[in-house]
Amino acid sequence: MAETIVLIFFAMLFVGIYFQLRVVGVLKNEYLEIWESIGRPNFINNSISTSYKLHKFIWKKRYSKLDHPKIIKYCNILRYYQIFYLVLLPFLFCLFVFGLTK
């Protein structure tokens, strides 16, 4: 069961990375000014400040002002995904650490 929890965790991690890359890609390619204003986020070299600005952009729904269906779709999915992740991750962690998976 512990292996299943680890696989779920990594699957969730990759889903989050995928959608974050989609959001950053659309911003970089089609909204360069916004991408630069939030610190030029990318996959490898983000500072805490850049990550904060990107999440603030998503959580305050600033993307909804853009007339771009893909960015709106990706950001909405990423918002709901992050909520789900923040709820499920502590639960999976407790199961893994306290051995409740036996």
Image (spheres, grey):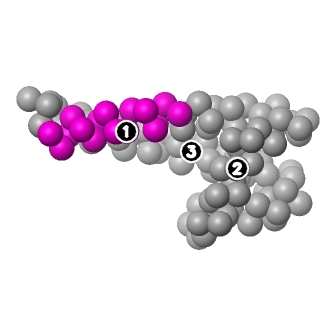
Asked if marks 3 and 2 touch (Cβ < 8 Å), the reply is no
Q: Is residue 7 magenta?
A: no
Q: CA distance from mark 3 to mark 2?
A: 19 Å
Q: Position of residue 76 (x, y in %)?
A: 68, 32
Dot 2 or dot 1: first in sequence order is 2
Q: Quarter of the image holding residue 82?
A: top right
Q: Position of residue 96 (x, y in %)?
A: 20, 40
Q: Is residue 3 visible?
A: no
Identity, as a three-letter code, of the amino acid under mark 2: Lys
Dot 3 or dot 2: first in sequence order is 3
Position of the N terminus, as image quadrant, is top left
Identity, as a three-letter code, of the amino acid under mark 1: Leu
Query: Dot 2 corresponds to which residue?
Result: 56
Query: Dot 1 corresponds to which residue?
Result: 89
Q: Is residue 97 magenta?
A: yes
Q: Residues within 10 Å of mark 2 (few under 14, many from 20)?
A: few
Q: Position of residue 77 (x, y in %)?
A: 63, 32
Dot 1 or dot 3: first in sequence order is 3
Camera-side residue: 12 or 82?
82
Q: Residue drawn 73% across and 31% down?
A: 73
Label disc, if present, on residue 18 of the rendered structure: 3
Q: CA distance from mark 2 to mark 1?
A: 21 Å
Q: CA distance from mark 1 to mark 3?
A: 18 Å
